[in-house]
Amino acid sequence: MTTIGTTTDQRLRAYRLVAVSGGVSRVVDGSGRVIGHVAQSGDGDGCRYRARRFRATSGGFIDFGEFWHLDDAVAALHDSR
């Protein structure tokens, strides 16, 4: 399990990342609740992170955008709660 960097926004430090498959991590809050997924694409300077959340009402995932930094993708999921 990976933690969010200590240099990040204080509100994100309780979140953990759990590897699901190649380049996809589940974002879990401090109580163990899954708040979404972050998928990594590309590598090096071209690496992007897509934030996604499952919505039962829509029957699938909703994209919250692509970001240059992992912390920004996690913040988008946090803010969408």
Image (tube, helix red, strand yellow):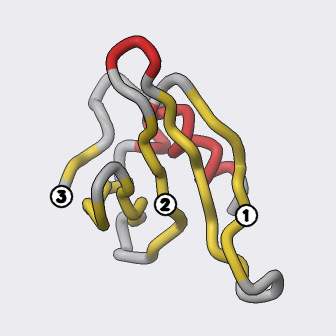
Which amino acid does the dot numbered 3 rest on?
Met
Location of mark 1 (residue): 62
- How far apart marks 3 and 1 lie (CA) works out to 24 Å
Residue density around tag 2, few if under 14, some if 14–19, many if 20 or more, within 10 Å? many
- SS class, disc 1: strand
Tag of residue 19: none
The answer to the question of whether label 3 and label 2 lie on touching residues, with beta carbons closer than 8 A, is no
- SS class, disc 3: loop
Tag of residue 37: 2
Q: Residue shown at 36%/57% (left/top)?
A: 25
- Front-most of residues 74 and 32: 74
Which amino acid does the dot numbered 2 rest on?
His
Of labels 3 and 1, earlier in sequence is 3
| 35 lies left or right of 25 | right
Picture mark count: 3
Location of mark 3 (residue): 1
Which mark is nearer the camera, 3 or 1?
1
Residue 11 at what x, y percent from top left? 49, 43
| 59 lies left or right of 34 | right
- SS class, disc 2: strand
- Location of the N terminus (image quadrant): bottom left
